[in-house]
Image (cartoon, coloured by chain):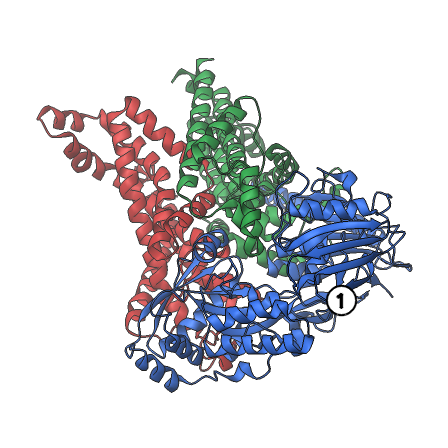
């Protein structure tokens, strides 16, 4: 039975990696080559169906959807990775200090995180985007801030667990400085949980970007963003269904890949499944 | 093995339960909706549901300013004058009127036997009260700047109302429609917003914020036989794409149809095209370099393709413009200006070079997110201007931020917006553009233009007024005050049975003559 | 008792912090409520009049203090955009959102529980693996798109479903269902995937425990083992997840209410934010936070009832 369990995980891992590596490859290629210029408009050619000259058809400005999907991987990874970096760095610092130091600092930090978490993410994103202004970087900052509490909680519980373990006490005894204990000794031991959470954060960032685009904000046109394309395609749902399936499919597949990867990682790193 | 089956069975059972519940309810509901909507019954109930994008700002007609509010509430109120579908005026609560030779005294004969929705007769007191309230003369704050030019108002007898002006103003009658000066009953003072009362064809029933505004037939309406409808519900729905689906699902009877989706409803619904009389523009902050240079503005005019915008953003449902004035305004419009700047990239480049920007420049276009048309237009602007070396970045902001920063703050480089239609040619040309006007947010300044706008008010001869207006439009085009793109049409989709819709050169869902027929 | 008291203090702190965060963000948020409300047609006189009428010419912190004072006496103040008491607006909308959230939870439960049990039973067989994959797809689809697709492929095909607006339960049960099923499904689909996984794992963990082996060896029927023991004992971990899912559902209503034009609290919140209607935003945010925190509180209390060991910690 254990063998079969591993087998399922392997499928998840394989599929997840396949999707992510696939999109990464597309992103690499898109830096040098796309079949058409992504922002070149050709109004007479608008809303052409897929096939032939335009692999996935064209949008309402006659731009090649396939090229824009390719280029959109750059936006997706930029927003996703930046969100993950902001979320994990600040999450680990806040959660780490709270867990390691404990006491009042723990209470203050974690209650603030609770308050942030009690906020529906999309509302906080909406307000933060209004403050920072739109754009790839600003959207990622807003989404990153929203990701902090979840990571901080994981980091905190990790630090609390490890705080009193023997190796930490030993390190303290030989006079290792606190920040060194925290980041050199404890952090590597909880990194697996954080990596899983980061993968999930990447996936939620994709979905949140799409939701922001639905509300008219988020990544700015004409930069191709899947979320924005998906929103724009709503007007052509019946007349040009291919337009909506391309970005919808891209988001779904990438997010699915990320979820599969995170599930596989979680199962592999779960000590109970190792024994 | 046995267990596996039972698990599956449980699942199927639950599914069946859910499905069963749905379908049996479904049948019940269809019968329900048939009797309530009555689309299959012989006598057609006269209840209409009209979809509107947003809530009104106020129901009090003197307080309301957003054009979306008037779209709805003008069904409840009337002024001394009433708008006509061609942009002219007709008598409203006034039966007839006279203007003195010097253009200063306006004498109105008031219609007799008019009743408010609460059954009270319309009296001179109410008319006096309404104007006093607007001018801030009965203790309250001044509510409008439209009547600053009024010297006095009086009611010499029970059917005459006289307004005296300080200076002649050929546009004054336009301030007397329900939009600017609705007549409301004195007895309702202090409650005009919670329980609005007027003399219009429909009376207020209920307002549910974010959901709908319900009106019912005014049984005492002074126009014999009108209105036909018993009930009008304005349902608020912000998503255009969802709204068209609601029309398809028969949940609303009348809605604007997104341009690209017209073909989906053609044939099964009545479509009417309304020239909105608004002017969609791309404009610049004209006090800021490089847009203070007329050559730069002209170059941009030559570079931007109106037809690309019309085709891709409005699916062709728009008329190109050459100034603020739309063809909807008849012969007030100066013809031919729309082709003054035919697309010409070489000429645009040459003009840019003459202005000293041979290598182009970098700038930013700030647009509002409340409607996708703005960011879509911006994308075409970016592509068009790239060809002449101008590098434009798009910044999409919320409507509130746009108003703050661009419209009121005037802290922007470029923007795009549609200037709401007005019934009067004067307002169309004066608002937003002339330095006489506080709304001049693109900070256009031209002395000849400002002089025309002052002089035209003193001119009583209609033909001469038109000459002034034509010259004003030429100036806007020559000076490239903005890139005048188009007057886009609103395509109204309605249930096949709905007849009697009227379209005005401004936003007004006039329900007075609408009815359902077989 | 101490445990519950501590939780209540926590709850109050969280709410206070949330209100301060909202207030802080509003301090730096560009955009003006009166201008947004009156639009481009307003003349300066009207803007000034309305601003002083609403007391918006006072500094924001004064407005916050006033708001806090009102809160202590149970008042949430007046909405700027709708010139109505926030309380009234909120109570009008609450039934919609609560019905939507309730129906969503029922759907999640009724689908994920049997599916999870079924998958656990068929562990690592093809049906299990494919169920896991299929449910994960539900998690990966952007919710507004999912909503649109449901409207297009279900809402417009079957006349039973209404795709916009809301009919109260009191008026017609079928009517309410016809307006709520599609939006509830839109929110439920991703949550089913999450809950399904947890149910499956929880049951698998129970099945491996010694007591199950013992009662099985005693000859108890598989049916009884499953429903009387395994399911009951798996409820504790499942309950924890359910707290999380409730919070997700509350958040999920926001976008989905927009797609289906449901006049709920989420839709009101989006309007309130874009109108910079501070009293209304504060009122709604309070409600949502209280709801989310309360749900977690109830889950924690239930948890301690189900598993007495927790109370000792």
Q: Residue at x 52, y 45 (%)?
A: C33
Shade of chain C as shown in the rendered figure = green
Quadrant of residue B418 in the image? bottom right
Side (left or right) of B505 relative to B430: right
Residue A2: x and y, percent?
A: 36, 43
Which residue ends up furthest to the top in the rendered image? Answer: C1
Can the viewer see residue C208 in this picture?
no
Shade of chain A as shown in the rendered figure = red
Dot 1: few (<14), some (14–19), or many (≥20) neighbours within 10 Å?
A: some
Residue C169: x and y, percent?
A: 72, 39
In front here: C75 or B277? B277
| In the rendered image, the vertical position of residue B483 relative to residue B414, given as above or below | below
Q: Residue at x 53, y 28 (%)?
A: C232
Quadrant of residue A226 in the image? bottom left
The chain ID associated with circle 1 is B
Is disc 1 placed on a helix, strand or loop?
loop
Mark 1 sits on what residue? B502
Residue B28: x and y, percent?
A: 80, 48
Residue B85: x and y, percent?
A: 74, 68
Quadrant of residue A274 in the image? top left
Can the viewer see residue C146 in this picture?
yes
Side (left or right) of C257 relative to B442: right
State which chain is coloured blue. Answer: B
Please identify the quadrant where the C terminus of chain B is shown: bottom right
In front here: A210 or B515? B515
| In the rendered image, the vertical position of residue C81 relative to residue C231, given as above or below | below
């Amino acid at each position: 039975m254990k063998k079969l369990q591993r087998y399922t995980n392997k499928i998840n891992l394989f599929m997840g990696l396949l999707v992510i590596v696939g999109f990464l490859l597309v992103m690499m290629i898109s830096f040098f080559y796309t079949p058409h210029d992504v922002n070149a408009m050709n109004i007479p050619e608008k809303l052409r169906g897929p096939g032939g000259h335009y692999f996935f058809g064209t949008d309402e400005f006659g731009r090649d959807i396939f090229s824009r999907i390719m280029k959109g991987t750059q936006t997706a990874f930029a927003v996703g990775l930046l969100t993950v970096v902001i979320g994990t760095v600040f999450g680990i610092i806040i959660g780490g200090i709270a867990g390691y130091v404990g006491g009042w600092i723990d209470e203050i930090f974690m209650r603030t995180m609770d308050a942030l978490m009690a906020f529906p993410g999309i509302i906080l994103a909406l307000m933060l985007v209004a403050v920072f202004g739109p754009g790839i970087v600003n959207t990622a900052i807003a989404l990153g801030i929203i990701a902090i509490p979840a990571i901080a909680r994981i980091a905190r519980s990790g630090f609390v667990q490890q705080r009193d373990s023997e190796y930490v006490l030993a390190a303290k005894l030989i006079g290792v400085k606190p920040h060194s204990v925290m980041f050199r000794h404890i952090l590597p031991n909880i990194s697996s949980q954080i990596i899983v959470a980061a993968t999930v954060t990447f996936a939620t960032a994709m979905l949140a970007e799409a939701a922001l685009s639905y509300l008219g904000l988020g990544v700015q046109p004409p930069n191709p963003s899947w979320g924005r394309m998906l929103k724009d395609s709503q007007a052509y749902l019946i007349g040009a269904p291919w337009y909506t399936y391309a970005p919808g499919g891209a988001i779904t597949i990438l997010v699915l890949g990320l979820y599969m990867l995170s599930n596989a990682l979680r199962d592999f790193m779960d000590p109970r499944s190792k024994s | 093995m046995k267990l596996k089956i039972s698990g599956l069975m449980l699942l199927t059972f639950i599914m069946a339960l859910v499905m069963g519940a749905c379908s049996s309810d479904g049948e019940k509901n269809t019968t329900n909706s048939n009797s309530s909507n009555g689309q299959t019954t012989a006598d057609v109930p006269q209840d209409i549901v009209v979809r509107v994008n947003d809530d009104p700002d106020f129901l009090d007609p003197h307080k309301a300013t957003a054009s979306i509010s008037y779209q709805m509430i003008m069904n409840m109120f009337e002024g001394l004058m009433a708008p006509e579908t061609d942009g002219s005026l007709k008598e409203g609560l006034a039966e007839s009127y006279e203007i003195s030779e010097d253009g200063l005294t306006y004498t109105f004969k008031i219609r007799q036997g008019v009743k408010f929705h609460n059954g009270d007769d319309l009296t001179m007191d109410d008319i006096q009260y309404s104007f006093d309230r607007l001018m801030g003369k009965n203790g309250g704050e001044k509510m409008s700047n439209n009547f600053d030019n009024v010297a006095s108002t009086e009611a010499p007898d029970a059917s005459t109302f006289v307004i005296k002006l300080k200076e002649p103003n050929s546009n004054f009658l336009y301030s007397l429609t329900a939009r600017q000066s609705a007549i409301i009953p004195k007895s309702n003072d202090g409650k005009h917003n919670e329980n609005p009362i007027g003399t219009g064809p429909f009376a207020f029933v209920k307002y549910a914020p974010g959901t709908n505004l319900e009106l019912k037939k005014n049984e005492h309406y002074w126009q014999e036989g009108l209105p036909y409808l018993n009930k009008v519900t304005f349902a608020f729905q912000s998503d255009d794409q969802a709204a068209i689906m609601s029309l398809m699902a028969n949940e609303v009877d009348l809605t604007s149809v997104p341009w690209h989706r017209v073909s989906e409803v053609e044939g099964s619904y009545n479509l009417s095209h309304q020239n909105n009389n608004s002017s969609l523009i791309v404009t610049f902050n004209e006090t800021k370099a490089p847009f203070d240079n007329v050559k730069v503005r002209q170059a941009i005019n030559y570079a931007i393709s109106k037809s690309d915008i019309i085709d891709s953003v409005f699916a062709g449902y728009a008329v190109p413009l050459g100034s603020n004035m739309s063809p909807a305004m008849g012969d007030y419009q100066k013809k031919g200006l729309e082709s003054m700047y035919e697309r010409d990239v070489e000429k645009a480049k040459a003009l840019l070079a003459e202005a000293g920007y041979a290598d182009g420049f970098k700038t930013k276009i700030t647009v509002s997110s409340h409607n996708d048309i703005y960011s879509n237009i911006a994308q075409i602007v970016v592509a068009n201007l790239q060809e002449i070396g101008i590098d434009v970045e798009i910044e999409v902001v919320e409507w509130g931020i746009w108003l703050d920063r661009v419209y009121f703050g005037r802290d922007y480089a470029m923007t795009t917006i549609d200037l709401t239609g007005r019934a009067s040619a004067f307002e169309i040309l004066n608002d937003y553009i002339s330095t006489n006007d506080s709304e001049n947010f693109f900070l256009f300044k031209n002395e000849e233009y400002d002089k025309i706008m002052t002089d035209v008010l003193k001119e009583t001869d209609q033909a001469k007024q038109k000459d002034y207006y034509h010259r004003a439009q030429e100036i806007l085009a020559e000076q490239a005050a903005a890139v005048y793109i188009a007057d886009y049409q609103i395509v109204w989709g309605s249930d096949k049975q709905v007849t009697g819709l009227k379209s005005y050169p401004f936003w007004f869902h006039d329900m007075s003559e609408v009815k359902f027929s077989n | 008792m101490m445990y519950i008291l501590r939780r209540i203090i926590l709850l109050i702190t969280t709410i206070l912090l949330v209100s301060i965060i909202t207030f802080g963000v509003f301090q730096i948020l560009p955009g003006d409520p009166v201008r947004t409300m009156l639009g481009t047609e307003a003349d300066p006189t009207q803007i000034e009049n309305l601003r002083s009428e609403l007391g918006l010419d006072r500094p924001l912190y004064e407005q916050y203090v006033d708001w806090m004072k009102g809160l202590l006496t149970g008042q949430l103040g007046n909405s700027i955009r709708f010139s109505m008491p926030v309380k009234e607006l909120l109570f009008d909308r609450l039934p919609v959102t609560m019905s939507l959230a309730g129906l969503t939870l029922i759907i999640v439960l009724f689908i994920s529980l049997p599916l999870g049990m079924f998958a656990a039973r068929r562990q690592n067989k093809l049906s299990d693996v494919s169920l896991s994959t299929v449910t994960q797809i539900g998690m990966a689809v952007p919710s507004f798109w999912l909503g649109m697709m449901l409207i297009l492929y279900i809402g417009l095909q079957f006349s039973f479903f209404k795709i916009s607006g809301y009919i109260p339960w009191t008026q017609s049960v079928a009517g309410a269902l016809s307006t709520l099923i599609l939006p509830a499904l839109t929110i439920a689909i991703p949550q089913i995937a999450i809950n399904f996984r947890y149910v499956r794992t929880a049951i698998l963990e129970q099945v491996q425990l010694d007591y199950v082996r013992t009662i099985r060896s005693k000859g108890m029927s598989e049916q009884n083992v499953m429903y009387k023991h395994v399911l009951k004992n798996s409820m504790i971990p499942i309950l924890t997840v359910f707290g999380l899912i409730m919070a997700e559902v509350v958040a999920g209503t926001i976008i989905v209410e927009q797609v289906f034009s449901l006049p709920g609290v989420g839709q009101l919140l989006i309007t309130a934010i874009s109108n910079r209607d501070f009293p209304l935003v504060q009122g709604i945010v309070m409600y949502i936070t209280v709801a989310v925190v309360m749900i977690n509180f109830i889950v924690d209390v239930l948890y301690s009832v189900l598993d007495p060991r927790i109370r000792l910690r």
